[in-house]
Amino acid sequence: MKAQLHHSVEITDGLGEIKFGFTTGDVERRLGAPDEAETLDPGTESAAMWFYAEERLQITFQKSATDEAMRITQLTTSHPAATLWGSRIIARRESEVLALFKTHGYEDFTASDESVGTQSYKSFRIENLRVTLDFRDGLLQHILWGEVESQPAVPHKRCKESGSPQAGSIAGRPPACLRAARTGRRLPPQRHPRRANRNFVALADSRQSFASS
């Protein structure tokens, strides 16, 4: 039986019970089979996107050179119940969403915009946090976030003791040196939802959504 998904966006961890690093099997056991699956790199079959219509959720899986399993590296949601830091964010105004991030110490966004007909689209991205916010006509349409490999921080005691590369934990997550030891993989580049992805764009109610660079 499919589990009910809690739409709590955890920037460095995942979405509710769906965590970064989960395999395709882990996800299918919790959410069932996807409504649609797309292979992104047909030649190598190293990346795929799954789409869940009811959950308004797009999941990107990727392999690495050291791990044959397809694992979650990126999530995108447009679900109206999605929360971040306890606040609902989908369909919130740009100023409100950016203020929420600023309250939590994040304000170094790179912005890009585009107009299609009478509608305007704007994207904000924090590269080191691997977060992209896409707005249409000033309202948040969806949020994309990826697994964070490491962040500069106070060296973690367990990393110092092991002699691994030092990186502090983020929001309670294990430090990157411990995650790398556990998974044996490095994170691939982040992927953005594309115009060609008709199912997710329709679910996000943003058929003219554009890809930020």
Image (tube, rainbow, N blue to C red):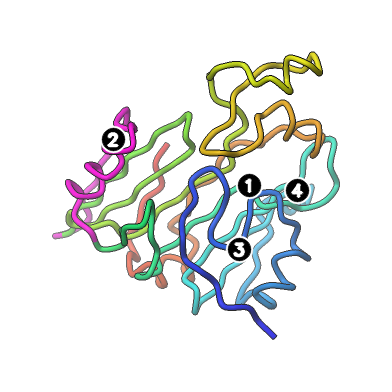
**Label located before the other in sequence (1 or 4):** 4
**Label located before the other in sequence (4 or 3):** 3
What is the spatial separation of the Cα atoms under label 4 and label 2, in whole angstroms?
30 Å
Looking at numbered disc 3 in the image, what kind of residue is underneath it? Glu
Instruction: Return the residue at label 3.
Output: 17
Q: Between residue 212 and residue 184, name the one nearer to us.
A: 184
Residue 122 lies, with reference to residue 159, above or below; the image says below
Looking at the rendered structure, the secondary structure element under dot 1 is strand
Q: Residue at x 61, y 63 (%)?
A: 17
- Binning the other alpha carbons within 10 Å of mark 4 as few (below 14), some (14 to 19) or many (20 upward) gives some
Residue 132, given in percent of the width and then of the height, sits at 40, 44
Q: Which portion, as a residue range, is magenta? A: 92-118
Q: Between residue 187 and residue 211, name the one nearer to us.
A: 187
Instruction: Return the residue at label 1.
Output: 73
Indicate the quadrant containing the C terminus: top left, top right, bottom left or bottom right: top left
Instruction: Return the residue at label 4.
Output: 46
Looking at the rendered structure, the secondary structure element under dot 2 is strand
